Amino acid sequence: QVQLVESGGGLVQPGGSLRVSCAASGVRLASYASAWFRQAPGKERERVGCISPGGGSVYVSDSVKGRFAISRDNAKNTLYLEMNWLEFEDTATYYCATGPRPCWTAPAMYNYWGKGTQVTVSS
C-alpha cells in the first residue's frame, strides 16, 4: 500500500522560509517522478516542482523559481520542498505526488497523493 505523508507546514511571515517534507512508503520515490503541487482556495491545483525518475531532471514553476527548491533523499525515501522569500500568494495546501510517468504538469498524470500540509503566509 502506497502512502505519502506530508509534514512541515505552518504559519510564516512574508519573506520567511519553510521546508515541507513528504515521507513515502510502499513506493520507491527514486524510481518515479516526484512532485509538489499546491492548491489555494478557489484555484486549480498547480505543480510547483518535480524531480524526474532517476533524478536526472528537476523542474520548478516560473512562479516560484529562485525562491523554492525541490530535492529528494533516496536513502530516506523522502521528498522535500524548501521555500524561501515566501509571499502572501504562496498560501495554499501543499501536496506531494508520485507516479511512473515523466514529470507532467497535469495532476491527473500522478497516481499517488498525500493528504497535504497547509502553508499560510501572513503578517
Image (cartoon, rainbow, N blue to C red):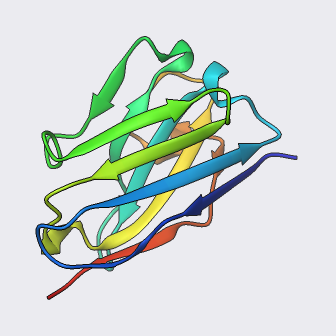
* Pick the front one: 11 or 105: 11
Q: Is residue 111 left or right of residue 12?
A: right
Note whether 38 is above or below 24 in the view shown: below
Q: Is residue 67 left or right of residue 33?
A: left
Note whether 78 is above or below 32 in the view shown: below
Q: How many marks?
A: 0
Q: Is residue 62 left or right of residue 112?
A: left
Is residue 25 visible to the viewer in this orientation of the structure?
yes
Residue 21: image x %, image y %? 52, 53
Q: Quadrant of residue 58?
A: top left
* Pick the front one: 102 or 35: 35
Is residue 104 visible to the viewer in this orientation of the structure?
no
Q: Quadrant of the C terminus?
A: bottom left
Note whether 20 is above or below 39 in the view shown: above
Residue 20: image x %, image y %? 45, 57
Residue 110: image x %, image y %? 57, 40
* Pick the front one: 83 or 117: 83
Residue at 62%, 23% (x, y): give it: 30
Q: Residue furthest bottom?
A: 123
Residue 101: image x %, image y %? 57, 23
Residue at 55%, 18% (x, y): give it: 53
Q: Quadrant of residue 74?
A: top right
Residue at 43%, 34% (x, y): give it: 71
Q: Is residue 63 left or right of residue 31?
A: left
Q: Quadrant of residue 6?
A: bottom right
Note whether 78 is above or below 119 in the view shown: above
